[in-house]
Image: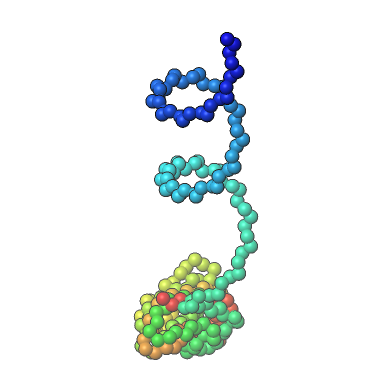
Amino acid sequence: GATGAQGAQGDTGPMGPVGATGATGATGAQGPQGDTGPMGPQGATGATGATGATGATGATGSQGATGPTGAQGDTGPAGATGATGAGHTLVRKAADETVTSSTTLQNDDDLKVTMAANETWEFEFFLIVNIQSASADFKETITAPTGSTIYWTSSIQESGSSTVTNANFATSSGTSVPLTVANTGAAPVRIRGVVRTGSTAGDLQLQWAQNSSNANGTIVKANSFLKAGKF
């Protein structure tokens, strides 16, 4: 006969136990790469690393050629003259000095230098002597403090001539030394020596006079000078 109507569905029965896992199937083909995502935020800056050691200094290169010397600059103005150093003395005779009718040695008015005890000095007198009578001639001496040791020599040149007369070598203070000439007129006299004082200070002093008394004066002229230096 005809199939009857379907009855109502019954309740689902309980799930049976899970079966064993089957073998992994083969990997399928890789799909296309997706679009790049947006960049993430920048991370914090890391700590600065330690400075490395300084490398060795390289060798110095060879010196280049010297360039040409530049033009010399203008000379600057001369500086002021410095003061005369200690122990150096210059004495200039400021005026003529005349001796008439006298053979007595007398101190020159200007030409002397003061020395302390236990000092050594060299000295030179340069005299312009005007002898108005050849018979009067000229004589001189050098005096030094008591206890001094002194050595000196002198010479005179004839007026209007190249003739020079040298006097004897003197080795003591106060030795009278004559200088004779044949002509009248200006005659240069040069006296040079060295002196060592002892325990007594005092002057190194030029003395002079006529060698023979004469009414015609003997003159030591202005600008005669003494030059002395202490060692």
Quarter holding the C terminus is bottom left
Residue at horizontal 46%, vertical 30%? Answer: 14
The percent coordinates of residue 106 (x first, y second) are 49, 88
Q: In the rendered image, is residue 102 in sight?
A: yes
Q: Which quadrant of the structure image shows residue 118?
A: bottom left
User: With respect to residue 50, does 169 lie above or below?
Assistant: below
Q: Which residue lies furthest to the front in this view?
A: 1
Pick the front one: 44 or 175: 44
Q: Which quadrant of the structure image shows residue 175?
A: bottom left
- Please name the colour scheme applied to the rendered image: rainbow
User: With respect to residue 22, does 195 lie above or below?
Assistant: below
Pick the front one: 62 or 181: 62
User: With respect to residue 194, does 174 lie above or below?
Assistant: below
Quarter holding the N terminus is top right
The percent coordinates of residue 68 (x first, y second) are 56, 43
Q: In this view, does 183 lie to the left or right of 170?
A: right
User: How many numbered marks have been drawn onto this rendered protein structure?
Assistant: 0
Q: In the rendered image, is residue 129 in sight?
A: no
The percent coordinates of residue 23 (x first, y second) are 40, 21
Pick the front one: 80 or 211: 80
User: With respect to residue 108, does 73 lie above or below?
Assistant: above
Residue at horizontal 61%, vertical 48%? Answer: 71
Residue at horizontal 60%, vertical 82%? Answer: 95
Q: In this view, does 58 lie to the left or right of 186?
A: left
Residue at horizontal 56%, vertical 80%? Answer: 93
Q: Residue furthest top?
A: 1
The percent coordinates of residue 152 (x first, y second) are 40, 77
